Image: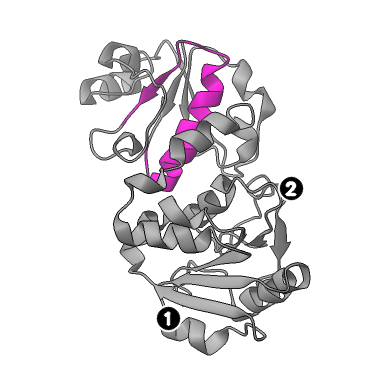
Amino acid sequence: MNIVKISGSTAQQMFQYAFYLELHQHDSEARLDVPDGKWIQAQFRLPYFLKATPEQLARFGRGSLKSRLLSKLKKTDGIVFKETAELRYNKKIFDKTDTYFDGNWQSEKYFQSAAQEIREAFSVPAKLLPARSQSMVNMLDQGKTVVMHIHNPQSKECTCTPDYYNWAIASVLAAESQAHFYVFTTSVDWAKEHLNFQGAKHDIVGYPASSETSLLPYLYHARHHVICNTLISWWAAWLNPNPDKIVIAPDVWTPGAAPNPDLIPLYWSTIPTT
């Protein structure tokens, strides 16, 4: 029996749960180690999961404080497999048995077979959204709409420069001359100052940085995406069911870190951030 650890932000937990659904196809008894606090079960209609018991977690030195302390004194029965810092896709991972998986698994390669099931789990029906969000969904469903996501553009964690966004705009317009850009940003003034839409239709919508996750239920309704280097932005583009979608992503995801070529799907386009 395998166990997958669920931890971190909403977007990180989405990757971990997606990995679990794929793993479940190889191990029907696979379980989840879910946090005591908030986890994504409350936000989405998760189709399936088995929760690991304290006894099952104890075999891996996980769960209770007592189990964790004992694991430092003696060898546990099961194997704890931690994802490497390189975050590269490991196709042999699904051959493992009796393993506790501790990682982020941030690549669609980890859940290719379960992709449709995952889209259904993480896609919130418009009728369940507040009236204001339903109106936004209706707008994004119409015409050649492009969601451009700009989150904390002046922070040290952001790799997306004005050049990145403006090159992305030019690239989209080369393919969709009648594109209508909807910019969702934590900094409306920054967007107005730095973006050149070359005469294209555009609307700029501000949102608080702490509310990024709340964008997810409707961002994926646009036709195309220009994403920033956040996992919510990644999920919004990935959940978009349009088979002809254009997705543009930054070529550098984490400042100062080595590239993760498995994070960005091959059918997306990358643009330099400098």
In x, y percent, where is residue 160?
58, 71
**Residue 210 higher or lower than 173, as above or below:** above
The dot on residue 188 is 1
Q: Are the residues tagged 1 and 2 within 8 Å (C-beta)?
A: no
Amino acid type of disc 2? Leu
Q: Nearer the viewer, residue 170 or 223?
A: 223
Find out whether residue 252 is within the magenta segment. Answer: no
Q: Nearer the viewer, residue 198 or 210?
A: 198
Classify the position of the C terminus by image quarter. bottom right
Q: Earlier in the sequence, mark 1 or mark 2?
A: 1
> Where is mark 2, residue-wise?
266
In x, y percent, where is residue 266?
74, 47
Element carrying mark 1: helix
Find out whether residue 30 is within the magenta segment. Answer: yes
Within-10-Å neighbours for mark 1: few <14, some 14–19, many 20+ = some
Q: Do we see residue 274 in this rendering?
A: no
The span picked out in magenta is 7-34
Alpha carbon of mark 1 to alpha carbon of mark 2: how far?
A: 31 Å
Element carrying mark 2: loop
